[in-house]
Amino acid sequence: MAIERTLSIIKPDGVQKNLIGEIFGRFEKAGLKIVGAKMVHLSKAQAEGFYAVHSERPFFNDLVSYMTSGPVVVSALEGEDAVALHRKLLGATNPAEADAGTVRADFAESIEENIGHGSDATETAAQEIEYFFGSDGVCARTR
Ligand code: CMP
């Protein structure tokens, strides 16, 4: 297995429910290292840009409204098989289909308000990390 990086977002409902520590704790216990993290209240333009791939989907406007409704916590995570591991910890996009013990099964209300986002592949992870951390970069963690 390769060491990968992935982008994680704790969405406005996760922040509002005071779940930042709980969710980061699950990531760290599973072996992922946090190599970048910040709280951001996304502008409409930032949310639209991040989700541009979904711009033709019927849920796009609601998604942008929701993602700009309050602050989010954006982080870059590093570890073995990080992209798949992080998505496994989050659970299925639709919490009704998420495995027991996953973040979404435990805390998410609906497919629209689903607590977290995780990159779906290493290529998108690199783009998404660049989108949020850009020239700030992320930290190299040797320990
Ligand atoms: P996320 O993993 O951030 O990627 C796109 C987001 O769109 C998804 O999580 C959900 O929050 C949201 N969304 C809303 N409705 C749907 C839907 N029907 N199918 C997929 N994603 C949806």
Image (cartoon, rainbow, N blue to C red):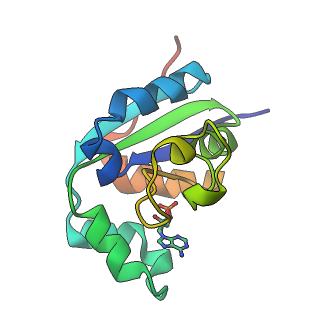
Using residue 108 as the reference point, say whether residue 48 is left or right of it.
Answer: left
Q: Residue at x 62, y 46 (%)?
A: 87
Quadrant in which residue 64 is drawn: bottom left
In this rendering, does residue 139 appear at all?
Answer: no
- Foreground residue among 103 and 123: 103
In the image, what residue occupies the spot 33% across and 81% down? 61
Which residue is situated farthest in the top direction here? 143
**Percent x, y for residue 137?**
37, 39
| Residue 115 pos. (x, y %) | 42, 50
Residue 20: % across, % down: 34, 34
Q: Residue 105, position in %: x, y? A: 56, 46
In the image, residue 64 above or below residue 122:
below
At a point 49% along the width and 85% down the height, the residue shown is: 57
Residue 78 seen by the camera: yes
User: Could you say which quadrant of the image residue 19 lies in?
Assistant: top left
Q: Is residue 99 left or right of residue 37?
A: right
Report the label total. 0
Q: Is residue 60 above or below residue 32?
A: below
In this rendering, would 123 be left or right of 114? right
Picture quarter with the N terminus? top right
Extreme residue in the right direction? 1
Please tell me which residue lies in front, 113 or 88.
113
